[in-house]
Amino acid sequence: MSIFEQFSVEGRSALVTGGASGLGLAYVEVLAENGARVTLTDIDTETAEHEAVRLRERGFEVYAQALDVTDRVQTDLAFEEHVRRFDGLDIVFANAGIDPGAGFWNPAGWRNEEGQVDTLDPARWDRTIAINLTGTFNTVRMAAKYMKPRRRGSIVVTSSNAAIITEPVVGLPYMPAKAGVSHMVRQLALELAEFGIRVNTIAPGGFITNIGGGWLKDETVRRSWDAKVPLGQLAEPEQIKALALYLASDASSYMTGAQLVIDGGTSLGRVG
């Protein structure tokens, strides 16, 4: 098999959570562009349907499905619908996640009163953990259910470089949620290897997406974040596609339990 053939996902079926925008949409696009049949799930049903229609108009087999990953019944039904439509499940991207709001420090250099551990609204903690950590569990739980009988499959989880570094401008709940996700992947990889199911993690740094209301799209904010990146700038979602295809395909057939950081060197620290 050639190197090119190893990256093929032609004819395979994939489900992506949080797929209507940002990194999730990039995952959907690269899978569809390389021949996969995709269910694009998102809590934002209008945008999800819009993107699915756009991709079908390009000739790709992409369908939208409403999904709140904190709702186990809805998650179960989304997977059931996917398997019914495509007669199986080969690839899952557990990507849905949210930004919990400001951290204890502001990029401008002053403390955020609402971001301190003693002033943080507990509802922010509960919602972030529910979506970013428990929602990932709900997703992988159903992926394993349908992949185990077939004894194959690739599960890719979106974590963050926040799982391995501290970042004062990021809301507190995000950090342990993503750290938990990354360690859960290692445990799941060990458990599911016997069934031929690979579980890996992508740990992005700063990408220009809609997370947090799209605040990184603001030029002033973006410049302050660009300055933290050793490679000089934040990334666009397009730049994650090759890594996503690698993990989804047989090109990574001997890889499981890995966490691949893609952050322009941010987690290495700053120079100067």
Image (cartoon, rainbow, N blue to C red):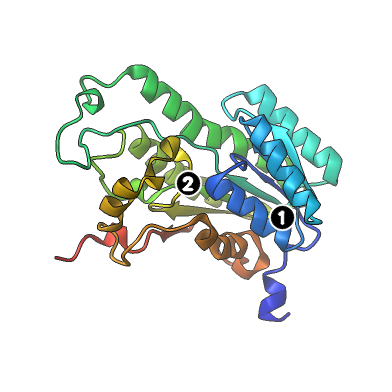
Q: Position of residue 185 (x, y in %)?
A: 50, 47
Q: Nearer the viewer, residue 158 or 19?
A: 19
Question: Which is more foreground, mark 1 or mark 2?
Answer: 2
**Residue 139 seen anywhere in this rendered image of the structure:** yes
User: Do the CB atoms of the residues marked 1 and 2 lie less than 8 Å apart?
Assistant: no
Q: Position of residue 41 (x, y in %)?
A: 67, 37
Q: Which amino acid type corresponds to the residue marked 2 in the rendered image? A: Thr
Quarter residue 248 falls in = bottom right
Left or right: 181 in relation to 229: right
Mark number displayed over residue 152 = 1
Q: Which amino acid type corresponds to the residue marked 1 in the rendered image? A: Arg
Q: Position of residue 133 (x, y in %)?
A: 47, 34
Q: Nearer the viewer, residue 143 or 132?
A: 132
The residue at the point 71 percent across, 61 percent down is 33
The residue at the point 50 percent across, 47 percent down is 158
The residue at the point 72 percent across, 37 percent down is 49
Left or right: 115 in relation to 46: left
Q: Nearer the viewer, residue 73 or 239?
A: 239
Mark closest to the chain's N terminus, 1 or 2: 1
Quadrant the N terminus occupies:
bottom right
Q: Secondary structure at mark 1?
A: loop
Q: Secondary structure at mark 2?
A: loop
Q: Position of residue 63 (x, y in %)?
A: 77, 42
Which residue is label 2 attached to? 209
How far apart marks 1 and 2 lie (CA) works out to 32 Å
